[in-house]
Amino acid sequence: MSAPDSFSRTQITLHWIIAVLVIFQLVLHEGMEDAWEIREDGGTVSLINPHVVVGTLVLVLAIWRLGLRLTRGVPPAPSSEPAPLRLLAAGTHWAFYALLFIMPFSGMALWFLEAEAAGEVHKTARLVLIALIFLHLAGALAQHFWFKTDVLKRMLGRA
């Protein structure tokens, strides 16, 4: 399969929807922690709540996005980019995919099965995800301002 010249409109849209939903999850996770504490104290909370619904939606969209990546492909990294940075970018993207699967599954295992170990995985994955987001943002900005490539424009649909 040859690499396409650009991301499809669907790939771009999925990228930004997933980004917004992940930020929503990270910013509003305390409500989920509060619900978990209520459950641990013997209180009653709905098993279906916004965090669970959005986490499941992120998983579904990540499956769709990964499917597109595997069937359609993605544009190649700029040839002017140093090889170590291309490797870092590729690793970062695959780590994102891994986390977009690990986090929903571990969250579901904790919430529905009360698997405490899954909760620890979920907490650790959250911290790794936050670090990856900052690395991803730094990489996108470096591509645009330092390396002067069209990488950022491609994901904005302007290349």
Image (tube, rainbow, N blue to C red):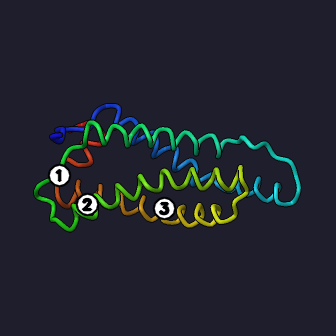
Q: Residues within 10 Å of mark 3 (few under 14, many from 20)?
A: some
- State the residue in front, 64 or 146: 64
Q: Which mark is residue 130?
A: 3
Farthest residue toward the right?
42
Q: Estimate the x, y position of residue 110 in percent, counting from the top left.
A: 68, 56
Indicate the secondary structure of the residue bearing disc 3.
helix
Q: State how far apart marks 1 and 2 are (Cα).
A: 9 Å
Q: Is residue 70 above or below residue 95?
A: above
Q: Amino acid at mark 2?
A: Ala
- Tell me which residue sits at (24%, 63%) in the image: 87
Badge 2: residue crowd in 10 Å (few <14, some 14–19, many ≥20)? some
Instruction: Tell me whether the residue at label 2 lies in contact with that at label 3, contact meaning CB atoms closer than 8 angstroms.
Output: no
Neighbour class for label 1 at 10 Å: few (<14), some, many (≥20)? many
- At 51% from the left and 49% from the top, the residue drawn is 22
Q: Amino acid at mark 1?
A: Thr
The residue to which callout 1 is attached is 149
Please tell me whether residue 58 is drawn above or below residue 98 in the rendered image: above
Q: CA distance from mark 3 to mark 1?
A: 25 Å
Which is nearer the N-term, disc 2 or disc 3? 3
Left or right of residue 97: residue 51: right
Give the mark nearer the N terminus: 3 vs 1: 3
Residue type at mark 3: give it: Ile
